């Protein structure tokens, strides 16, 4: 292990850190592993219902791929994963296309992400357009969504094939159709 000379200023510190990352310096490996693990855990915390539909090893593999190819653009990990639904939707073209209903999972992921944004105060009133396909039997996944996100009030007569609105009122999340 090589000895690191302390930097004289912040800019130099950043240059040294970037150089160490590019060289796969073992001192930075711990940081890289922690970064990856924290971001994977964030996806696990956000997409609770999606995980119910996938084998743990499949969800973990998707999370690893997502973390590798989609760096965080926010400081708050509670809202990491804004494009995770796109990765799920793309699985219809992959080797595991028959493993799950990827379009449904992508739609559930969009809902879970929007619920999380509302829960953490990033959106007071967010609209979601219907996904690109009609969902015939949404009762089961809405039931699971209610179980995984008990702080969310999901309208009993919710039609997932119409525009949705997610509102945060007094720390409660409401999921309804747009009137």
Image (cartoon, rainbow, N blue to C red):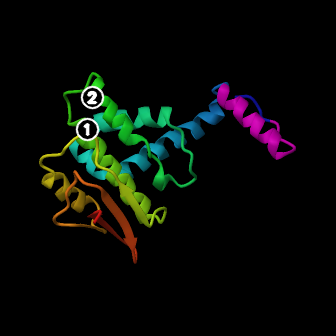
Label 2 sits on residue: 92
Give the residue at x 16% y 64%. Answer: 157
Residue 70's disc number: none
Give the residue at x 33% y 36%. Answer: 88
Label 1 sits on residue: 103
**1 and 2 marks in contact (CB < 8 Å):** yes
Q: Is residue 100 left or right of residue 124?
A: left
Pick the residue in front: 102 or 34.
Answer: 102
Q: Neighbour class for label 2 at 10 Å: few (<14), some, many (≥20)?
A: some
Give the residue at x 63% y 35%. Answer: 28
Residue 70 at x, y = what percent? 50, 37
**Most extreme residue toward the top, as rendered?**
95
Q: Main secondary structure of the magenta part?
A: helix
Rounded to the nearest whole Å, what is the CA distance between mark 1 and mark 2? 8 Å
Q: Is residue 6 left or right of residue 49?
A: right
Residue 50 at x, y = what percent? 28, 46
* 64 falls in the magenta region: no
Q: Work out which quarter of the rendered image holds the C terminus and state it.
A: bottom left
- Residue bounds of the magenta highlight: 5-22
**Most extreme residue toward the bottom, as rendered?**
170
Of helix, strand and loop, which one carries label 2? helix
**Most extreme residue toward the right, as rendered?**
8
Vertical side of 5 occupied by 45: above or below: below
Give the image quarter of residue 99: top left
Pick the residue in front: 126 or 86.
Answer: 126
Residue 119 at x, y = what percent? 41, 65
């Amino acid at each position: 292990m090589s000895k690191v000379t302390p930097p004289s200023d912040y800019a130099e510190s950043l240059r040294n850190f970037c150089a160490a990352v590019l060289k796969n310096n073992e001192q930075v490996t711990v940081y890289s592993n922690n970064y990856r693990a924290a971001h994977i855990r964030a996806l696990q915390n956000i997409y609770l219902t999606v995980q119910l539909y996938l084998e743990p090893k499949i969800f973990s593999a998707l999370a690893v791929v997502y973390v590798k190819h989609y760096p965080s653009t926010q400081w708050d990990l509670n809202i990491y994963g804004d494009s995770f639904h796109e990765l799920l939707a793309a699985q219809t073209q992959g080797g595991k296309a028959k493993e799950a209903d990827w379009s449904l999972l992508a739609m559930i992921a969009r809902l879970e992400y929007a619920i999380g944004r509302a829960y953490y105060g990033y959106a007071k009133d967010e609209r979601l357009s219907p996904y690109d396909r009609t969902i015939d039997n949404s009762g089961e996944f809405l039931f699971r969504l209610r179980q995984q996100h008990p702080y969310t009030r999901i309208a009993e007569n919710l039609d997932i094939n119409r525009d949705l609105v997610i509102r945060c009122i007094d720390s409660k999340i409401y999921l309804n159709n747009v009137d």
